[in-house]
Image (spheres, rainbow, N blue to C red):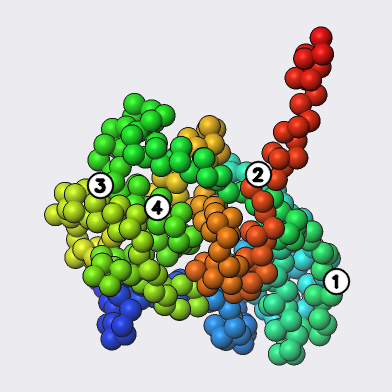
Amino acid sequence: MAKTTLPKEYRIHNKSDKPDNIVERDNKIYLECEKIEKELPYFFRSYFVYLKGNVLPMTRLSYLREVRSFLNYLIHQTDLTVAETPRTIKAEELNRVTAMDVNLFIDYCRKYTVDDGKNVVIYENNNKTLARKKSSVSVLFKQLYRDGLVEKNITDGFDPIKVPKPGEREIKALQDDEVMVMLDAVTTGASLTKHERLYWEKTRLRDKAILILFLTYGLRLSELQQLNLSSFQFSRGEFKIYRKRGKESIMPLNRSAIMVVQDYINNERAMVAEQTDAADEDALFLSLQGSRMTQRAIRDLVKKYTSIALDTTRQNGYSPHKLRATAATSLIGRGNSIYDVQALLDHEQVTTTQLYASHKMNVKRDLVKDMEWELERKDND
């Protein structure tokens, strides 16, 4: 009788000064990358090495996923390979791929369907997503060319993808009066549905603390989701966050942040902490089941309260990243230095912060407020 081999359980042996949840998060990304690499051809090894050493872990994971998707496209949508899996594709088959084939792949990705046997799902991708797919495949073929595995560098023939420059995009952020509407909603339960109020009664302190931290510090979603009780040193008036690229940052606490976070910790969190597993006992923001809140749950929470501020549907509420934009525009609007705001928000380039400086929240309203054509017409009647 054949033995059944159970999958090995990975354990974190953390000897760094980072909390276990940060190490575990990074390890999950690493393991997922390793898993996908085993699904891809062995001769991609130098590509794997390049990604590991030159891009952020999440970018590495994203590129590997996109390349796997491209190889599956070659298998199922073209006659360029006889392979049945990405792993078995041969180098000579990739040598037959032309720039036109890649351009057709990008065009295919604009809109396609997947039949999973139960449902047919329609996928649509915007130009930003298509540009990432193109970039991942471009880096792959450049590396294959350097390694001598393909005869030509076909990347020069890839069609350009028009992606709006940062300065061309309309910056979406809440105005100060909308922030106040949102905070009033989370404080009083105003404008919530009957069903939403049932949860709000148990989570209002948690929800308010989340919104205040987003609005005050412009935290990224992952930075807030990974916060721990041990991240906070109230006696010193500060807390620690873990940024991209493995950076640590000490953030000063103001009175509002101290007030809402301590209120949540001492009341709502204390009530659900008894259900918490050892793995999540240090997590700051807990679900009603006592586990660390997921990024999706936090995103849904933000969309709910911002939709009230914007007087729109829950689906059209803002994402946490737009609260980051709200923090940036509000800080600059209060006369703070662009360079100080850059440091607080961890922008790699000050030009990113300058986009928020040039975004004047009320400039359009000021321009049109004296152009009341219909009111003037009625006044003249």
Dot label at residue 212: 4
The disc at residue 302 is none
Element marked by disc 1: helix
Q: Which residue is mark 2?
A: 362
Residue 157, how many percent across, how many down?
Answer: 85, 71
Measure the C-alpha gap from mark 3 to mark 2. 39 Å
Q: Which residue is mark 1?
A: 157
Number of other residues with Cα within 10 Å of mark 3, as a class: few under 14, some 14 to 19, many 20 or more: some
Give the Cα distance between marks 2 and 4.
Answer: 23 Å
Query: Residue drawn at (49%, 73%), measured in percent from left and top?
Result: 244
Instruction: Report whether 357 appears left or right of 316.
Output: right
Horizontally, residue 363 falls left or right of residue 259, namely right
Identify the secondary structure beneath mark 4: helix
Reading the chain from its start, which is encountered first: label 3 or label 2? 3
- Which residue is found at the position 34% from the left and 29% from the top? 195
Q: In which quadrant will I find the C terminus?
A: top right
Q: Marks 3 and 1, Cα distance to the nearest angstrom? A: 53 Å
Tell me if label 4 and label 3 are in contact, CB under 8 Å: no
Q: Residue at x 79, y 61 (%)?
A: 161
Above or below: residue 57 compared with residue 212: below
Instruction: Choose the circle earlier in sequence order: 3 or 1.
Output: 1
Residue 381 shows in the view: yes
Which picture quadrant has residue 168? bottom right
Q: What amino acid does circle 1 point to?
A: Gly
Q: Amino acid at mark 2?
A: Asn
Please give the residue where the numbered disc 3 appears in the rendered image: 288
Residue 343 is situated, as x and y percent measured from the top left of the image, at 53, 72
Q: Quadrant of residue 46?
A: bottom right
Q: Nearer the viewer, residue 141 or 380?
A: 380
